[in-house]
Image (cartoon, coloured by chain):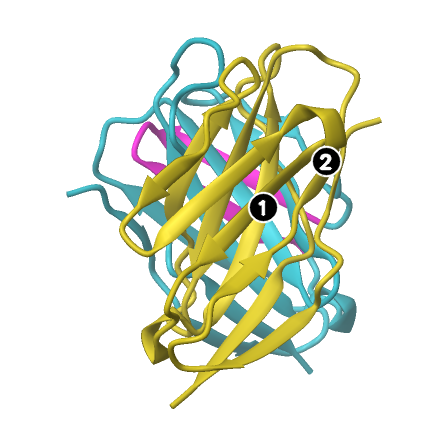
Chain colours: A cyan, B yellow
């Protein structure tokens, strides 16, 4: 079975803290993604990675960075958390396919509250 | 510009009613892919269906059916004889063939099915 695991389901952090959100997939997928989900805005892409040590900015990368040292692991980093980063964060992965036919699999999400 | 619109923010029905979730998309590309995902309260997005732009055949899977109409740029989703377990947020998404990795999501429709 396909599995994308996000290590923390619920986090509460203070403004200015450095926050790490970890995501692991067990499907040997090349592509990994971080999305942010907010009410009324749907899911928005923060960063994605095609391969180890490779990353590309999505639609809303400001205030975030990522790390992909191993193929199975993709970390989202908030260098200095702010209250407007309170949100649900979803990790996803997919195999590199052709023509967009590959399915993207999502984790269960991490609810982050910044106080 | 590419965009996905789910105009219905929230729908409430009573069990056994049929319900249709609307999705309208915008793209100038001739090749693209449309998706529906279900997000139950647990948070994980569950893949339901993928349809490519060359295939306008309607699809039925059990109580679920999808109506893809290029003429109106719509990809609507119907649940027949709804059940309480169908209660979730449903997202429609668009992926372009030249960019196989990014999904453009609608804002989602929350479906509540009451017993």
Which chain is mark 2 on? B
Look at the image and tell me whether residue A19 can be seen: no
Q: Quadrant of the C terminus of chain B?
A: bottom left
Closer to the camera, B66 or A64? B66
Left-right relation of A47 to A90 = right
Q: Which residue is mark 1?
A: B76
Residue, far right: B1
Question: In terms of secondary structure, what is the magenta stretch mainly?
Answer: strand
Residue, far left: A1
Closer to viewer: mark 1 or mark 2:
1
Left-right relation of A109 to B20 = left
Task: Determine the residue positioned at 77% across, 29% down.
Answer: B2
Position of residue B30 relative to residue B75, above or below, is above
The image shows residue A77 at horizontal and vertical percentages of 57, 50
Closer to the camera, A46 or B64? B64
Task: Determine the residue positioned at 38% across, 14% down.
Answer: A97
The image shows residue B84 at horizontal and vertical percentages of 36, 80
Query: If you read the primary sequence from the N terminus, does the residue marked by circle 1 or circle 2 appear first?
Result: 2
Give the secondary structure at mark 1: strand
Q: Which residue is mark 2?
A: B25
Left-right relation of B3 to A92 = right
Task: Determine the residue positioned at 71% across, 69% down.
Answer: A16
Which chain is mark 1 on? B
Which segment is the magenta one? A64-79
Residue A48 located within the stretch drawn in magenta: no
The image shows residue A7 at horizontal and vertical percentages of 34, 61
């Amino acid at each position: 079975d396909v599995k994308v695991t996000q290590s923390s389901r619920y986090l509460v952090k203070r403004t200015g803290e450095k926050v790490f959100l970890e995501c692991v997939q067990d499907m040997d997928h090349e592509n990994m993604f971080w999305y942010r989900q907010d009410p009324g805005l749907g899911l928005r892409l923060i960063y994605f990675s095609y391969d180890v040590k490779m990353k590309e900015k999505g639609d809303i990368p400001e205030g975030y960075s990522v790390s992909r040292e191993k193929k199975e692991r993709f970390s989202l980093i908030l260098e200095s958390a702010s209250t407007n980063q309170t949100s649900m964060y979803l990790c996803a992965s997919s195999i590199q396919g052709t023509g967009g036919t590959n399915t993207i699999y999502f984790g269960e999400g991490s609810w982050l509250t910044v106080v | 510009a590419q965009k996905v619109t789910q105009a219905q923010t929230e729908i409430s029905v009573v069990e056994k009613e049929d319900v249709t979730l609307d999705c309208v998309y915008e793209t100038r590309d001739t090749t693209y892919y449309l998706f529906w995902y279900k997000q139950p309260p647990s948070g994980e997005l569950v893949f339901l269906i993928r349809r490519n732009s060359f295939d306008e055949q309607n699809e039925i899977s059990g109580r679920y059916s999808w109506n893809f109409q290029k003429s109106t740029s719509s990809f609507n989703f119907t649940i027949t004889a709804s059940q309480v377990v169908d209660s979730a947020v449903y997202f429609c998404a668009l992926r372009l063939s030249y960019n196989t990795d990014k999904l453009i999501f609608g804002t989602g429709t929350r479906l509540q099915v009451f017993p």
